[in-house]
Amino acid sequence: MSAEYPLEKCLLTMPDVVMNKLLGLLDFPAVQCLRKTCHTMRNFIGAVKLDSALINLYITVEPNSITSLYFFHETSIEVKYCRNGEGCDVEWRGRDNRTQKKLLESEDFVDVASRDIISVLTDQKSVMKSLKLDTFRCPNDILEEQQELLYEVSQQFLSNLESHLASKPRKLQVKTFRTKVVNVAQVLHILPHLDVKNLAIGNGRKVNYDAVLNIQQLIELEQWKKLDTLNIYRFCVDLRVGNLVHLKKCFVKYETVDTAMIEELKEAFRTSSHLEFFRIEHGQPDIQHLMDPRYAGPHIHSDQFDHVTHSWFFSVSTPKRVLNVSLCPYEIEFDLDWLVNVPEAATIN
């Protein structure tokens, strides 16, 4: 290209139809580079509203850094934003797998990371496969003051992201949302602004894995009622069974379980057309006595590690299927299994 006709001049004088066609042929990294050439080009790309075509986005928040990992169809990009005095170091690794670095003076690393992530989500039109957001993930050796700093950084980042998502005319479409948090309030920054089918919430602390997560505010959301799968790990829950039976699959932990809970879930599985699998952890080493003695069984199975499982089988409304209720130390499973998988010696109730 000659000096008389610089690249940006040629691009800016192209008809909009041609520019739209050209932009549609570029991948995400190329569009981001083009966006930075000048304000006019950035504004034009913003007005076109290209689809970022982002498949997965993983974000990890730490006391002094935020890392974002973007997955597209044929490439992935990792960007890390680090606190550097009053400025921000930005490191990224793109298609050539070479690490590049840039210092942004007088820029807060949380705000820089937020802006970049938001710029990608702004152009997202297609349904993302997964959004993973670890806003509170403590290493084993983290100091107490670092935990406090991590919480402050997490809250700042979540507030920035929430402001953007709340301003959008429609919710961000994501198949699976995974997050590690310290409390349910951190989940509530993001979940109300998502159109999501599968939700996983983990305890980001390295201690107190039996803490009860108060999710009463979550079950009041429209997103809760539309979930297919729920996985809450390293937390306990205190929920009525009725708040779970709209799910297809569920993985949660209760401090204790009782006969009424087992019976209610069993009946829900027997009459439902959508329930598939529930695994409920608990803190009780021996619960076989909680199963109603009127039922035939159990079928007793021992694995290679001498872990003993007691299973009861029940007929269901779905043809060729059977409900397998398995009790073992610290765990119960409700599995809508195939009839052909029932052991010969077992009795179906």
Image (cartoon, rainbow, N blue to C red):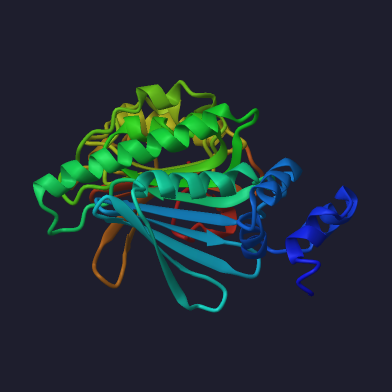
> Quick one: 298 or 40, which is closer to the camera?
40
Report the residue at 82% width, 61% height from top.
10
Q: Position of residue 349 (x, y in %)?
A: 48, 41
Instruction: Give coordinates of residue 78: x percent, y percent.
Output: 47, 64
Q: Nearer the viewer, residue 302 or 296?
A: 302
Give 306 or 210, whichever is nearer the viewer: 210
Could you tell me which residue is drawn at 57 percent across and 74 percent down? 95
Percent coordinates x, y for residue 308 in the rendering: 27, 59
The total number of labels drawn is: 0
Using the rendered image of the protein, determine whether residue 67 is visible from the camera's viewpoint.
yes
Q: Is residue 129 left or right of residue 142?
A: right
**Could you tell me which quadrant the N terminus lies in?**
bottom right
In the rendered view, tell whether residue 322 sits above or below residue 341: above
85 and 151: which one is in front?
A: 85
Q: Who's the residue at 60% across and 69% down the image?
A: 75
116 sits to left or right of 287:
right
Task: Name the residue: 57% across, 46% down.
Answer: 119
Position of 25 with respect to 234 (left or right) is: right
Q: Is residue 155 above or below residue 74?
A: above
Say whether residue 284 is visible.
no
Residue 50 placed where, x, y %?
A: 72, 49
Residue 68: which quarter of the image? bottom left
- Report the residue that reaches farthest toward the left: 144
User: Which residue is outermost to the front?
Assistant: 4
